[in-house]
Image (cartoon, rainbow, N blue to C red):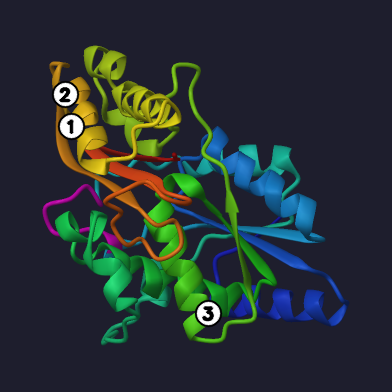
C-alpha cells in the first residue's frame, strides 16, 4: 500500500495508472474509520482496479464553535485497517499544501446547500464542495463513493460534479448501522453511555413513520408530528430538523406521492447526529 502526503506525487501516480487503463475508485474520508467507511471501500473495489482513500480533516467544514481540534484522529489505526482492506493508495495531504497562504477560492452549490444541515451549519457544504473538488483534482478518479448517511452531502457532490462537467461517477453506498439501528459515525464517540442508549431513537422514529405510511398515512404534517412526539419522549434528544424531501432535488414534500426520503438531525448531548431513510 502506497502512502502519499504530496499532492504532486498523488497526481503523478494517478496519471500513470490511468495511462495503463486502470479504473480508479476513490473514497474521501476524514479518518477515524469505522465499518461504514470500510463498506465504501468494498463498493469502490467492486467497481474499479485501483482504490485510493484520502484521510484529511477538513477545517473548512467546521465553524469556529465546532469540533475541528477535538475531531477524533488515529492515523496509525486507520492505515492498518486500510492495508487489511487491500487499499492501493492512501492520500494524507498536508494542511498547508491543501490550503496554502492566501487561499481564497471556494466552491458553492448554492440552493442545495442552504437548507437542512446548511441552515445550522452555513459554511459546512461550501467547505465540503471545495475540498472534494480539490481531492478530485488530486486523485483524478473515474468514480467516487459517498455514504448515504450524509445524504444531502451526496446530492450536493453529485450536483457539483454534473454542473462542472467532472468526468467522475458519484456512487452512493447504503448506510451501515449498529445492531440497534444507530447509523455508524465517528461522532458517536461523543455519546455518554446513557446518551448512547437513546441514540437509536432517530432510526426507530423513521421506522415507525415508514410503518404508518405503509398503512396509508400520506400527510407529511401528521407523520412529522408522530416523529417529534416519539423523539421528544426521550430524555436527551433535541431536534434540529425533520423533513420529508424529494430524493433527487431535496424539495420538501407535503404529501407522500412517489419516492420520498426522511432527513433528520438531532442533538444528543454534544453529538449532532444525522440520519435518513426512504419512505
Q: Is residue 158 magenta?
A: no
Q: Which residue is mark 2?
A: 229
| Mark 3 vs mark 2: in front | 2
Q: Identify the residue shown where x is 59% and y is 80%.
A: 8
Q: Which residue is mark 1?
A: 225
Across and down, in percent, residue 228 comes to 18, 30
Q: Is residue 165 left or right of residue 72?
A: right
Across and down, in percent, residue 41 comes to 66, 48
Categorize mark 1 by other alpha carbons within 10 Å: few (<14), some (14-19), many (20+). Answer: few
Gap between marks 3 and 1 measured at Cα? 36 Å
Q: Identify the residue shown where x is 30% and y is 13%.
A: 197
Q: Is residue 268 visible?
A: no
Q: Is residue 277 above or below residue 216?
A: below
Gap between marks 3 and 2 measured at Cα? 39 Å
Q: Identify the residue shown where x is 41% and y is 67%.
A: 156
SS at badge 1: helix
Magenta residues? 61-68
Q: Disc 3 or 2, which lies upstream in sequence?
A: 3
Q: Chief secondary structure of the magenta span?
A: loop
SS at badge 3: helix
The answer to whether the residues at label 3 and label 1 have Cβ atoms under 8 Å apart is no
Return the residue nearer the eye: 134 or 249: 249
Return the residue nearer the eye: 146 or 210: 210
Q: Is residue 247 left or right of residue 191?
A: right
| Corner quadrant of residue 6 | bottom right
The answer to whether the residues at label 2 and label 1 have Cβ atoms under 8 Å apart is yes
Gap between marks 2 and 1 measured at Cα? 6 Å
Amino acid at each position: 500500500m502506497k502512502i502519499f502526503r504530496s499532492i504532486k506525487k498523488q497526481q503523478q501516480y494517478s496519471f500513470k495508472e490511468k495511462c495503463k487503463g486502470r479504473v480508479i475508485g476513490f473514497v474521501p474520508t476524514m479518518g477515524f474509520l469505522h465499518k461504514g467507511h470500510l463498506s465504501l471501500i468494498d463498493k469502490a473495489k467492486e467497481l474499479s482496479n485501483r482504490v485510493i482513500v484520502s484521510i484529511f480533516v477538513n477545517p473548512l467544514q467546521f465553524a469556529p464553535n465546532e469540533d475541528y481540534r477535538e475531531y477524533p484522529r488515529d492515523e496509525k489505526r486507520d492505515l492498518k485497517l486500510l492495508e487489511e482492506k487491500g487499499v492501493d493508495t492512501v492520500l494524507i495531504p498536508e494542511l498547508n499544501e491543501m490550503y496554502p497562504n492566501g487561499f481564497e477560492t471556494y466552491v458553492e452549490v448554492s440552493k442545495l446547500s442552504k437548507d437542512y444541515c446548511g441552515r445550522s451549519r452555513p459554511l459546512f457544504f461550501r467547505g465540503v464542495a471545495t475540498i472534494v473538488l480539490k481531492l478530485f483534482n488530486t486523485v483524478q478518479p473515474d468514480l467516487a463513493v459517498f455514504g448515504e448517511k450524509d445524504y444531502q452531502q451526496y446530492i450536493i457532490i453529485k450536483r457539483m460534479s454534473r454542473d462542472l462537467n467532472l468526468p467522475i461517477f458519484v456512487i452512493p453506498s447504503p448506510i451501515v448501522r449498529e445492531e440497534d439501528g444507530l447509523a455508524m459515525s465517528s461522532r458517536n464517540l461523543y455519546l455518554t453511555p446513557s446518551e448512547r442508549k437513546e441514540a437509536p431513537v432517530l432510526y426507530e422514529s423513521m421506522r415507525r413513520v415508514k410503518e404508518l405510511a405503509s398503512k396509508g398515512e400520506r400527510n407529511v404534517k401528521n407523520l412529522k408530528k408522530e416523529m417529534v412526539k416519539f423523539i421528544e419522549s426521550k430524555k436527551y434528544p433535541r431536534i434540529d430538523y425533520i423533513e420529508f424531501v424529494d430524493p433527487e432535488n431535496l424539495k420538501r414534500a407535503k404529501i407522500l406521492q412517489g419516492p420520498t426520503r426522511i432527513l433528520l438531525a438531532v442533538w444528543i448531548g454534544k453529538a449532532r447526529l444525522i440520519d435518513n431513510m426512504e419512505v
